[in-house]
Each structure stands twice: as C-alpha cells, then as structure tokens.
Image (tube, rainbow, N blue to C red):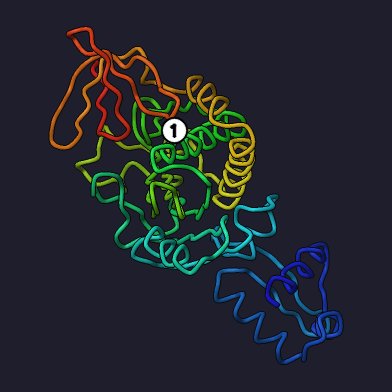
Amino acid sequence: MRERILKLLKASQDGYISGEEISRKLGISRTAVWKHMNKLKDEGYEIEAVTKLGYKLRGIPDLLVPEEIKSKLDTKVMGQRIYYFEEIDSTNSYCKILGEQKVPEGALVVAEHQRSGRGRLGRSWISPAKKGLWFSLLLRPQVSSQEASQLTILAAVAIARVLHRKYQLPVGIKWPNDLLLDGKKFAGILLEMKTEAEQVDYLILGIGVNVNITCEEFPQELAGEATSLQVEKGSSLARVELLTAILKEIEELYLDYLANGFNKIMELWKKYNVTLGQTVSITNWQQTWQGQAYDLDANGGLIILLPDGTMKTFYSGDVTLKR
C-alpha cells in the first residue's frame, strides 16, 4: 500500500494531493492514509501536509527501501522479490535461508548496514550504515560446482560495465573477485553455494560496494588499500540508481550466460581485467605459488605459468599483483 501511495505522491509532485483523493483511489480510509504517511516519514521521506490542500512529497531519502528500488528497477528476474533490512548480520546468511526455502531465483537481500559482513577466506567486510551497497542475490543455475565460479566473474563484469558506462570510472577487475580503482579495492564478491551430486542446488552472490564512504571513515589498517566511488569520483552517488543499474546488467549477462555459455563473459572480463600478463603470487590451502597470470580456462579458473615452465590452474585463492 505504501508503494501505491508513493506512486500517487510522485505523480503529484507539482502540486498537492488530498487525503480524500488518495483514500478514494486506493479504497482505504483517511485514517489509514494518515498512518501510512507517518510510516513513510519515519523511513525518511519528506512529506508536507497542508490543511485543505493535502500532501506533497518534498524529498526522497537515499535509502535502499523496496519502494524506491522497485520504482527504478527494470528487470524480470533480479530483485522481483526484495528482503530489506536496516541492519543484519550478513545478507548472505539470510539469503541461504531463502535458498533452503525454495524461494525463486532473483531474490534480493539488501541491508543498510551489516554487523558481520564477510569477504572471501573468512575475512570481514566493513559495511557502514547507508554508505554502500551490501546485498545478496539468490540464483539457481543448472551448472556444476566447478562452473559456479563463472558467476563471480559475471558479477564483476556487470559492476565494471555499469561504472564504465554510467559513471565513466576506469574499473579494473582482479581475479577472482576484487574490483579496483587506481589500484585500490572498492568492491568485492563472495560466492557461496549448496551442491547436490556436484550440481548446484542454489548459489548466492554476495556483493559489497563502497559507494559514499569518505577517506576518513575507512579504518586505519585499510588506508592505501581501500577506496570508494565517492572518493574516486569526487562526489556522492545515488545508491538506489546504482543498485538498480547493477541488477539490470547482472540480469542481462546472466540470461545470456544461461542461453549461450561463458565465452562472452570471459571475453568481457579480459577487457576489464588487471591480472593477466602480471607477475602474481597466489595463496591457496596455506600454500603460495608465484608465476605469471597466463589466461582463464573454460570454467573461469586462473592459469598460472610457473617459473619451471609448467602451467597450474586455480579456481580459488588469494591473488597479489607483484609491482
């Protein structure tokens, strides 16, 4: 009902709309209209109420509330079900519950703040309130567990394409899941899945994007390593607009991937990657290898040319670029 009220308010932004008209159009009481208006005000909407004139929407908050996401979302799958939290331990953890409940793919779990945001290899992810995009998508692709890493690459490509085209930001992708600006990380992807007989039952793409975090708000230990879109662009970004653009791009690439395979995604990744051709060290299972990042294999694994001339392929690991 609040979504419908917001549509009426937005359609009447050049003037006022009376409580009586809202009541008549939506088939609810004037008291119900008043209660919904108060709830919208509590969420941060600036609504002016004038006797004999009615209500006027004066300001929209930069909140990732379902009403705002849906008003700008142009997808058929991604984000058609939205689970919104002001605060949560981890969007991935809640998304796992949805996976077990057989919720259809495309479900979006989004939070203003994560108390225990997680990155790869058990690391924490700093996710301050209302400063970034902290969200998870539930997917159910019919792929093997080895092919699942392709979805991390797909999500990275989607984010890079949006930021290149929409915001003219020169994003680079470091295999497997880091997005960089000026050599500093501003976004990461955590893929988790449940498998049965080597086939994926469901897969969760957890995505964190530092959007409007200032330099001063980063912990001291991340100085020189982390950045945000606001820092790099020099101005703040509207988070709902960015989120919906990313969801649309992920959907387009995902549907193409399901229909045509991984080749297009891999070629797009190569356009944005900052890994291939570089001397790297990669740590996996408490062992470290060094060599040259040579190519991706058909499943998205990173092929390393080792100093002895042999090739080794990795499907996970912590990569450091040697400067």
Q: Compared to 265, does 27 lie above or below?
A: below
Q: Residue at x 55, y 59 (%)?
A: 107
Q: Is residue 289 above or below residue 61?
A: above
Residue occupying image coordinates x 47% and y 39%:
151
Q: Residue at the top extreme? A: 309
* Residue drawn at 81 percent across, 64 percent down: 11
Residue 279 falls in image quadrant: top left
Judge from the rendering whether residue 188 lies leftward or rightward of residue 320; answer left or right. Answer: right
- In percent of width and height, residue 196 lies at 40, 54
Residue 16: quarter of image: bottom right
> Where is residue 307 drawn, in percent x and y?
18, 9
Q: What amino acid is at disc 1? A: Glu
Q: Position of residue 41 (x, y in %)?
A: 60, 75
Determine whether the residue tagged by mark 1 lies in a helix, strand or loop: helix
For residue 26, side relative to residue 156 (left or right): right
Q: Quadrant of the image for the N terminus? A: bottom right
The x and y percentages for residue 228 are 41, 40
Q: How many marks?
A: 1
Q: In the current view of this chain or complex, which residue is farthest to the left?
A: 286
Position of residue 135 relative to residue 103, above or below, is above
Circle 1 sits on which residue? 232
Instruction: Judge the density around disc 1: few (<14), some (14-19), many (≥20) Cα neighbours within 10 Å.
Output: some
Between 124 and 233, the one nearer to me in the picture? 124
**Residue at image x 63%, y 44%?**
248
Q: Nearer the viewer, residue 72 or 104?
A: 104
Q: Quadrant of the C terminus?
A: top left
Q: Is residue 133 left or right of residue 59?
A: left
Image: 272 above or below 285: above
